[in-house]
Image (cartoon, rainbow, N blue to C red):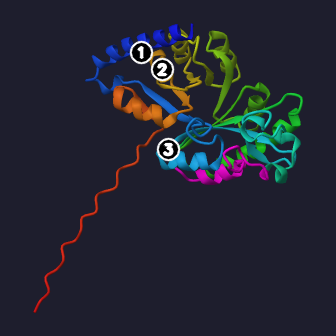
Amino acid sequence: MKRFLKIAAFAVALVFSADFASAQSRVEDYPTVQFFAHRGSRFEYDENTMLAFREAYARGARGFETDVRMTGSGDLILSHDESLYRTCGVDKQTEDMTTEECLKIKTKSGNDLALCQELADFLAGKPNMYIEWEIKTIPELYTEAKLEELCKKLWDMTMPTKHESSLYLFTSFDTRALRIMKRLHPDAQMMLLKSKPASPEILMEAYNMGIMRVGCKMDGTTRSTIRLGHKLGMIVSLWPGNNKEDFFLGAALGCDAMCCDRFFEVAEWAEKNLPFVKIKGYEKPQAAAPVVAEKPKKSKK
């Protein structure tokens, strides 16, 4: 079945490629995809670490997604899973540890866990950035009061230093967190996340919350649903993005944004092989100009 889906994705992509190749004379018709490195491009770097974000930025990534949790001390820390076992080999939750205890733990690759403040400071003032701050929750641990505390801290930590040309999104699967952020900051840019394909019901759920972005699973999402979202003035982001086939499929479906766990592998391949798809969020570093040796001056006698 998986092999069939991959073949089908390639077939759709080939049709998509042929359609757009015939229209290359009209640049305004080219699709634009907001591309961003999921957890700092987790299959290329040690996910959600400052090493990942620094290295990826240096290579030209201008779009990131990261995951925000709280420590038992009330500080914000970057970690995806409820347990640190997968990434660090420690079967504990950040919520059950003090910040000091969390910062003593290393990832399996030997890197420090990153505080949210570290990433916010690194991004401060950087132009043309696309950042998704995903609010991770555990329902029984995150009360309404704790979510409000998290939302206040996250906003105060990130927004004052955001460059005016950058876009910071606050995202979550937990509608409570989004409603609280919306109440505290009505102008906040937010996105409702779902572990399901995009559907009219999901679009309307977000729309009725005053949220104009949804992030849904790529598999099962249809072009008609994405077009419906566009008619409503909404932006549809798809995940997960693991490989070239996923990029093909997402672009063919007409999505607005895609995350990727192999950001550079896919972005560099797409730039070379899909020139009719404009990738936003990747600035390929310019090659340094060759150094020309200065000719020695003739000595005067």
Residue drawn at the location 65% of the way across and 19% of the way down: 207
Residue 111 or residue 251, whichever sits in front: 111
Residue that mark 3 sits on: 128
Is the Cβ of the residue at disc 1 closer than 8 Å to that at disc 2? yes
Determine if the magenta segment contains residue 121: yes
Q: Closer to the observer: label 1 or label 3?
A: 1
In terms of secondary structure, what is the magenta stretch mainly? loop
Mark 3 or mark 2: whose residue is earlier in sequence: 3
Residue occupied by mark 1: 13
Q: Which residue has dot 2 on it?
A: 245
Residue at point 41%, 15% (across, down): 13
Mark 1 / mark 2, whichever is N-terminal: 1
- Rendered location of residue 202, percent (x, y): 67, 15
The image quadrant where one finds the N terminus is top right
Q: Nearer the viewer, mark 3 or mark 2?
A: 2
* Residue 209 location (% of width, % of height): 71, 22
What residue do we see at 86% from left, 33% from top?
142
Instruction: Please name the amino acid that badge 2 sits on.
Output: Glu
Using the image, determine if residue 270 lies above or below residue 69: above
Q: Magenta stretch: give its range.
A: 103-126
